[in-house]
Image (tube, rainbow, N blue to C red):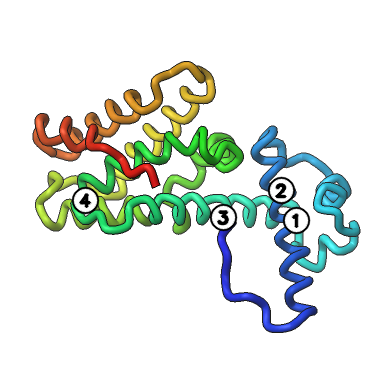
Amino acid sequence: MPTSAPPSNRFERRRAETRQALVRAARQILAETGDTSVSIQAIAERADVGFGTFYNHFGSKTELFDAAVMDALEEFGQAIDERLEGADDPAELVAAGLRLSLRMVDSHPELMRILRHRGLGHIHSDRGLAPRALRDLERGVAEGRFAAVDPTVALSALGGSLLSLVELRFARPELDADEAASSLAEMILRMLGVPSDDARDIARQPLSSA
C-alpha cells in the first residue's frame, strides 16, 4: 500500500497503524463485495480494533470507504509509475498504461476488484492513474502527438474503456487479456489521431517484465 513519512513517535506510529488497519479492512470489503452497508462493528472486528476506536480516525463509514478507495487508487498509480519509468512518448505511455492496468487483474486482484466496483466514480479523480493519464493526454495534444481533442473528454473515453475491459476480464477469465488490451490501446491511439500503422506498432511493443 502507499506509504508516507513514518510517524515520529510511538503514539503516532500506533495511531497510523490503527488507521491503516481500518483502511485495509475497508479495502477488503470493497474488493469482496463492494457493499458499504456493513456495520462499523463488523469493520472494527475485521481490523481487530475496538468499536470506539473507529471514531478516533473517521467520522463515518463514508469517510472510511472514501479513504480506502483513495488508498487503492494511489497504489494503482504508483505501480504503473514503477513500470513506466523512463518512458517519454505520450502515445507509448497511454498504451502501456492501459495494457499494464489490465495485467493487474492477475497481479493485483484485490486492487482491481476495488476499481471494478468503484472506479467509474473516480475516472476524474486527482489520485491514481487518472491524473497521470490526463498529464500524458495534455502533453500529447500540446506536442502534436495527439489530435486537438479535449484531454478531459479523452480521459473519460480512456477510463470508461479500461473499466469495461476490466469487467470483461473478470467475467471471462479465459480471455486473452494481453491481446484484448493491445487491441483497445490501438483503438484509443487511433481515436487520439495517431496514424494506424504507428498505433498498431505502439500498442504491441513488448512490455517490461519488471
- Give the distance between the C-alpha atoms of the residues marked 4 and 3, in whole angstroms: 25 Å
Residue marked by disc 4:
90
Give the mark nearer the N terminus: 4 vs 3. Answer: 3
Name the foreground residue: 153 vs 208: 208
Amino acid type indicated by mark 4: Pro
The numbered mark at residue 22 is 1
Q: Quick one: label 1 or label 3, which is nearer the N terminus?
A: 1
**Residue 73 visible within the image:** yes
Query: Which residue sits at x=49%, y=47%?
Result: 122
Instruction: Please say if the residues under marks 3 and 2 sit with CB atoms less than 8 Å apart.
Output: no
Q: Is residue 105 above or below residue 57?
A: above
Left or right of residue 89: residue 51: right
Describe the element under mark 2 as helix, strand or loop: helix
Q: 19 above or below 146?
A: below
Q: Residues within 10 Å of mark 2 (few under 14, many from 20)?
A: many
Residue drawn at the location 63% of the way across and 75% of the way down? 6
Q: Is residue 18 left or right of residue 79?
A: right
Image quarter in which the N terminus is found: bottom right
* Residue type, mark 1 in image: Leu
In the rendered image, the vertical position of residue 153 relative to residue 195, given as above or below:
below
| Label 1 residue SS | helix
Q: Which mark is residue 37?
A: none
Residue, disc 2 = 26
Answer left or right for 187 relative to 4. left
Q: Position of residue 72 (x, y in %)?
A: 57, 50
Tag 3: amino acid: Met
Residue that mark 3 sits on = 70
| Secondary structure of the residue carrying numbered label 3 | helix
When asked about the image quadrant of residue 180, the answer is top left
